[in-house]
Image (spheres, rainbow, N blue to C red):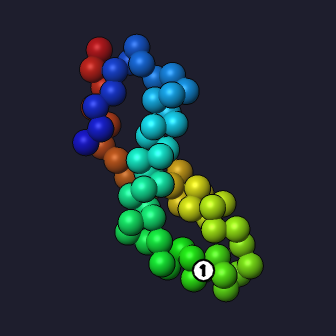
Amino acid sequence: MIYLNYSNLDAETQERLMQTSKADVERQFGNSLKAYALKHHLNYQTVLEEEAIRHLNSYTYVFNI
């Protein structure tokens, strides 16, 4: 679970969430994503970022008001 405060949803918090998601995706699927990027002649960082954005939807968020 990720605990967020409604008063702190600024760009810095969003970037922190994105970096966390990227690290999770890279740890879980890094080798597969690298192979996919090589096979399809894609930029690995772009593929990683797209998957990290999709991965953000799998988190459970708790908002504190």
| Residue drawn at (33%, 27%) of the image | 4
- Name the residue nearer the viewer: 13 or 60: 13
- Name the residue nearer the viewer: 62 or 14: 14
Above or below 21: residue 12: above
Above or below 59: residue 45: below
| Residue drawn at (45%, 37%) of the image | 16
Above or below 5: residue 3: below
Tally the numbered discs.
Answer: 1
Q: State the residue position of label 1.
A: 36
**Which x, y percent locates residue 57?**
43, 49
Quadrant holding the N terminus: top left
Observer able to see residue 54 = no
**Which x, y percent locates residue 51?**
53, 60
| Residue drawn at (49%, 79%) of the image | 32
**Which x, y percent locates residue 52?**
50, 55
Amino acid type, label 1: Tyr
**Which x, y percent locates residue 34?**
57, 76
Helix, strand, or loop for circle 1? helix
Observer able to see residue 58 = yes
Quadrant holding the C terminus: top left
Above or below 14: residue 30: below
* Farthest bottom residue in view: 39
| Residue drawn at (43%, 62%) of the image | 25
Q: Residues within 10 Å of mark 1 (few under 14, many from 20)?
A: some
